[in-house]
Amino acid sequence: MNVLLVVAKAPVAGLAKTRLCPPADPTQAARVAAASLLDTLAAVRATASTIPVLAHAGRFADAEYGAELTAALAGWHLLPQRGDAFADRLANAHADTAAAYPGRPVLQIGMDTPQIRPALLTTALERLAQHEAVFGPALDGGWWALGLRDPSYANVLREVPMSTDDTGRRTLAALRKRGLHPSVLPVQRDVDDWPAALAVAADLPGSRFAGAVEAVGGQLVNGRAR
């Protein structure tokens, strides 16, 4: 079985998705983050033949929809994130997952792509069975997925500046420098700002995420809220 690793932080008001403010207030932004995470957890749960792992930061007891998130995480292997810089926390999450499940490939995603569905995760895992690595670029220049047959290669992330418009390019370069040639997955949109939230919500009618976005901006019309 493969390991599906989600890296996330507890959606606490004032600490989560602050770039959605305005138009969202801090509580609404945290609820959008919680909805995104809940939709992501459901997609992972529905992906066959996988072991779900969450590397988390923060306290879910303090989070919006904390009780629902705690219930959704029943049966998951939970790992606290380690490290100060985000790049170190990512690399450590891969290392800690590999220690818990030695010898298994690890596919890592975040909580910012609630549009990801089991079919796409299955495709990524199938490619990981045929390649040493898979890489999912994001529209903003970052990345949404990193799969490694040998999770120790995640150490290259420590060299990469995160949350920049060339993080994806630099990550690919670091992997290739180590001799890996990842299979590239379809580009996805990260929910990092309000226009991205609107665009993703418009493609997910009826989802938890779309409902949380609509609660901030009203009914979605052609990708915008009125």
Image: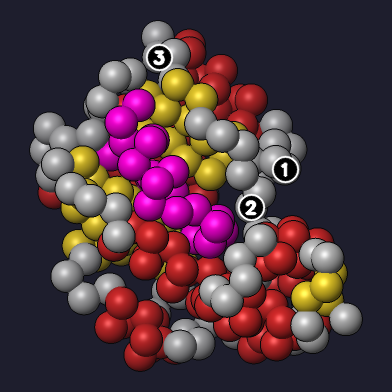
Which element is circle 2 on?
loop
Marks 1 and 3 sit apart, C-alpha to C-alpha, by 23 Å
Judging by the rendered image, the residue that carries numbered circle 1 is: 140
Judging by the rendered image, the residue that carries numbered circle 2 is: 190
Which element is circle 3 on?
loop
Q: Which residues are magenta?
A: 106-127
Judging by the rendered image, the residue that carries numbered circle 3 is: 180
Which residue is located at x 67 percent, y 67 percent? 201
Please state which of residues 131 and 60 is positioned toward the viewer in this rendering.
131
Is there a contact, CB below 8 Å, between mark 1 and mark 2? yes
Residue 121 magenta-drawn? yes
Marks 3 and 2 sit apart, C-alpha to C-alpha, by 25 Å
Question: Which color scheme does this rendered protein use?
Answer: secondary structure
Quarter of the picture holding the C terminus: bottom right
Which residue is located at x 51 percent, y 31 percent? 185
Number of numbered labels in the structure image:
3
Which element is circle 1 on?
loop
Q: Amino acid at mark 3?
A: Leu
Please state which of residues 219 and 212 is positioned toward the viewer in this rendering.
219
Query: Relative to 151, is 207 on the left or the right?
Result: right
